[in-house]
Amino acid sequence: MELTGRLIQVLEEVGGEGKNGKWSKCDFVIETAADKYPKKVCITAWGDLIGTVKATPLESEIKVSFDISSREYNGKWYTDVKAWKVEGGSGGGSSQPSRNSNNSNNNSGSQERPSTQSEGSGSQERYVSEDDLPF
């Protein structure tokens, strides 16, 4: 899927280490302009895409290609919007890392569970890798 909009916020980069090595991710928010009522969408960039997103100036027009996936955990559903290509701004054009080059982009064999983490004025759901889940 693709979405074009204005980059309005880049959140703090988060990282850690899992069974497949080190990983890092960064959420960013774009606002669509195609509709009468613009919508804001929070998208997650992993690995190499983080540099592209951080190099893009705020308020610039960007085009993001992404995948959407949902999963159930303890009777609740959680949805991820993960970018795999970012174009536009002055961040150097486009970036499209290999999907298999960084095992943190490929969650096969590992599941995530939500944990609440306070940030700024409110709390936001974060996902923590959990390898010993039964599914």
Image (tube, helix red, strand yellow):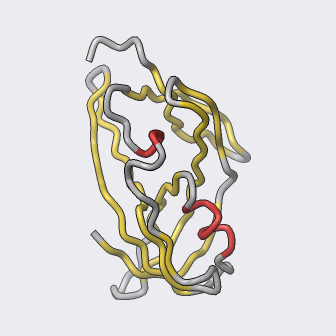
Rendering quarter of residue 68: bottom left
- Of 59 and 35, which appears nearest the observer? 59
Residue at 41%, 55% in the rendered image: 82
Position above or below: 91 against 106: below
**Which residue is found at the position 60% from the left and 70% from the top?**
52
How many numbered discs sit on the rendered protein? 0
Percent across and percent down for residue 17 are 61, 29
Q: Where is residue 9 in the image (x, y as percent from the top left)?
A: 63, 68
Q: Who's the residue at 36% across and 70% down the image?
A: 65
Front residue of 80/85: it is: 85
The N terminus - image quarter: bottom left
Q: Which of 11 and 33 is in front in this view?
A: 11
Residue ID at (58%, 40%): 23
Location of residue 47 with respect to 127 vertically, above or below: below
Please state, as top left, top right, bottom left or bottom right, where the C terminus lies in the image: top left
Q: Which of 124 and 27 is in front in this view?
A: 27
Q: In this view, does 122 lie to the left or right of 71?
A: right
The reply, left or right, for residue 65 in relation to residue 69 is right
From the viewer's perspective, is residue 86 above or below residue 16? below
Q: In which quarter of the image is residue 18?
A: top right
Left/right placement of residue 45 relative to residue 82 reads right
Residue 14 locus on image (x, y percent): 65, 43
